Amino acid sequence: MGAWAAYLKSGIGQVIAFALPPRCPGCGAVTGEDHSFCADCWQQLDFLGDPACAACGDPFALDRGPDALCGACLADRPAFDRARGAVAYGEIARKVALRLKYGGRPALAETIARAIARLADEEQDALIVPIPLHRWRIWRRGYNQAALIATALGRRTGIPVELDLVRRVKATPVLRAMGPAARAKALRGAFRVTGRHRAMVKGRAILLVDDVYTTGATGNACARALKKAGAARVRLVCWARVVRDEAERH
Ligand SMILES: [Zn+2]
Ligand SMILES: [Zn+2]
């Protein structure tokens, strides 16, 4: 268990959370209720839904049916069966993700889990698994933000969580600036299902959890490792998703 998770579970964490006034997870303004956004931030959040690509969840402007795929997924179907984000990656969504990642605000994992919970409706038979960080990154930061979200989501939905099912065995550079081919190369062999977990994965539905979905390359590599280990189904849920063609939606 990470230091933050232990802190959250401890009575001290709960007493402190209780004593402080609730604040907007987006801007920090005092609000009436824990985990609720102020009116300004709420209005700026772009909650995602249908219609969207059946595989990657990229929103469509027009409904093309429940099984329709976007061009990218038609050309190269991802290893995960489906990916969905709670909100589009915009200014407020980004702030929330960064505050969880670097700001040491673990209560935000609970806020995010609340937003993601609706995406986990049909996943009662699944096993929640966070996309892992390489241990060097965990040492530097102290925790894996995806693991915090996964733990909070498990608590909220009652779906079992397995934090160490997948290992990140290769440290990968920042992928943002890379093209698709370089990204795929950097991620090759980056994830592995640990030996003692192989039996658990076989024939199982896995619900992968991450904070942000940018190109899907990381989720894809992680899903590939899970499918290789015999997972029956791999779906991915995240807080914020970069929407590929923002202009097309409006
Ligand atoms: Zn706000
Ligand atoms: Zn797609």
Image (tube, rainbow, N blue to C red):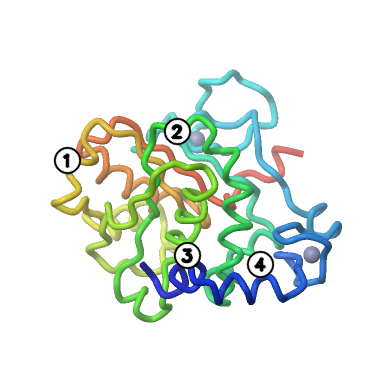
- Quote the CA–CA distance across marks 2 and 3: 23 Å
2 or 3: tag closer to the N-terminus: 2
* Marks 2, 3: nearer the viewer: 2
Task: Give the SS element for disc 4.
Answer: helix
Residue 110 image position (x, y, % from top left): 59, 58
> Comparing marks 2 and 4, which lies closer to the viewer?
2
Q: Judge the density around disc 1: few (<14), some (14-19), many (≥20) Cα neighbours within 10 Å.
A: few
For label 3, the SS is: helix
Residue at 51% x, 28% y: name it. Answer: 54
Q: Amino acid at mark 3?
A: Gln
Q: Earlier in the sequence, mark 3 or mark 4?
A: 4
Q: CA distance from mark 3 to mark 1?
A: 26 Å
Which mark sits nearer the N-terminus, 1 or 2?
2
Measured as percent of width and height from the top left, residue 194 is found at 18, 54
Instruction: Kindly identify which residue carries mark 4.
Output: 95
Give me the disc on residue 124: 2
